[in-house]
């Protein structure tokens, strides 16, 4: 029975997330409970947590950025971004997202995949700016508002997905090369990166047309 006790940590995680308690607190309590129930002393458990955090500190950097984004949002980042877009007469949701996709693809092609993303730019900047552009002349309904948010997230995904393959030192290129090599196709990473360029251009053009159609559909659904 004793060797099953550490599994109570899983129960703590399940109950904690079901009750929507603070995720960081739930995970920490579950980790401490698991260690103590496994027979470790409190100092050894905390030392183990600290070593795990240190070994994965590059991943933890993302969680350091999130509070900064939250503070900026609290002090009006989204409102300032929306105000900026309302002052640009030619701005529309589709045009704005086309420019963002170009930026996302270009930076991803240079290996700067973490320079933007959903928590860093889409939620606090891109989506509010696209909404402001869509609502410049007339208010739009709730469905259209959610649609603009979804297209903002999708544009980030497409820009990143088709842009990063142009950079030869990215993990996806290594994965593709290893997969093809296992099937007898010996290609260099540079070859794969070069052939990714036409795909990226085609993806940009196709999604740009779809974003242009988004503007048209928003105009038809305005209140």
Image (spheres, rainbow, N blue to C red):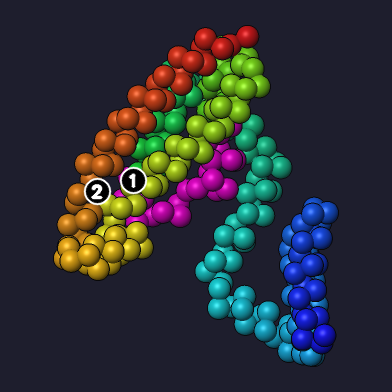
Camera sees residue 95: no
Side of 129 where 202 appears, left or right:
left
Side of 55 where 11 appears, left or right:
right
Question: CB of mark 2 within 8 Å of CB of mark 1?
Answer: yes
The residue tagged with tag 1: helix, strand or loop?
helix
* Occupied quadrant, residue 155: top left
The residue tagged with tag 2: helix, strand or loop?
helix
Residue 38 position within the rendered picture, expressed as x and y whole percent measured from the top left: 77, 86
Residue 87 position within the rendered picture, expressed as x and y whole percent measured from the top left: 52, 21
Would you name the residue on which mark 1 appears? 162
* Residue 123 painted magenta: yes
For marks 2 and 1, give the CA distance. 7 Å
Residue placed at 19% from the left, 49% from the top?
A: 195
Check the picture and name the quadrant holding the C terminus. top right
Q: Which mark is residue 196?
A: 2
* Occupied quadrant, residue 191: bottom left
Q: Above or below — where is 94 with respect to 166?
A: above
- Give the magenta part as a residue range: 106-128
Secondary structure mainly formed by the magenta segment: helix
Decide which of 123, 89 is in the foreground and name it: 123
Side of 78 where 193 appears, left or right:
left
Decide which of 174, 107 is in the foreground and name it: 174
Residue placed at 55% from the left, 78% from the top?
A: 55
């Amino acid at each position: 029975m004793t060797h099953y006790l550490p599994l109570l940590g899983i129960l703590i995680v399940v109950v904690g997330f079901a009750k929507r308690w603070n995720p960081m607190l739930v995970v920490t309590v579950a980790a401490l409970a698991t260690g103590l129930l496994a027979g470790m002393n409190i100092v050894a458990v905390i030392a183990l947590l600290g070593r795990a955090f240190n070994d994965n500190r590059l991943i933890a950097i993302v969680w350091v950025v999130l509070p900064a984004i939250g503070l900026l949002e609290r002090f009006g980042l989204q409102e300032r971004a929306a105000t900026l877009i309302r002052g640009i007469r030619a701005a529309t949701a589709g045009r704005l997202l086309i420019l963002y996709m170009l930026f996302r693809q270009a930076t991803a092609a240079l290996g700067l995949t973490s320079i933007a993303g959903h928590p860093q730019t889409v939620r606090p900047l891109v989506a509010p700016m696209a909404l402001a552009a869509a609502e410049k002349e007339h208010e739009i309904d709730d469905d259209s508002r959610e649609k603009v948010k979804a297209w903002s997230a999708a544009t980030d995904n497409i820009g990143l997905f088709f842009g990063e393959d142009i950079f030869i030192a990215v993990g996806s290129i290594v994965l593709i090369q290893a997969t093809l090599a296992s099937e007898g196709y010996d290609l260099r990473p540079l070859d794969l990166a070069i052939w990714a360029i036409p795909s990226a251009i085609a993806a940009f053009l196709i999604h740009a047309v779809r974003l242009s159609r988004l503007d048209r559909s928003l105009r038809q659904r305005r209140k």
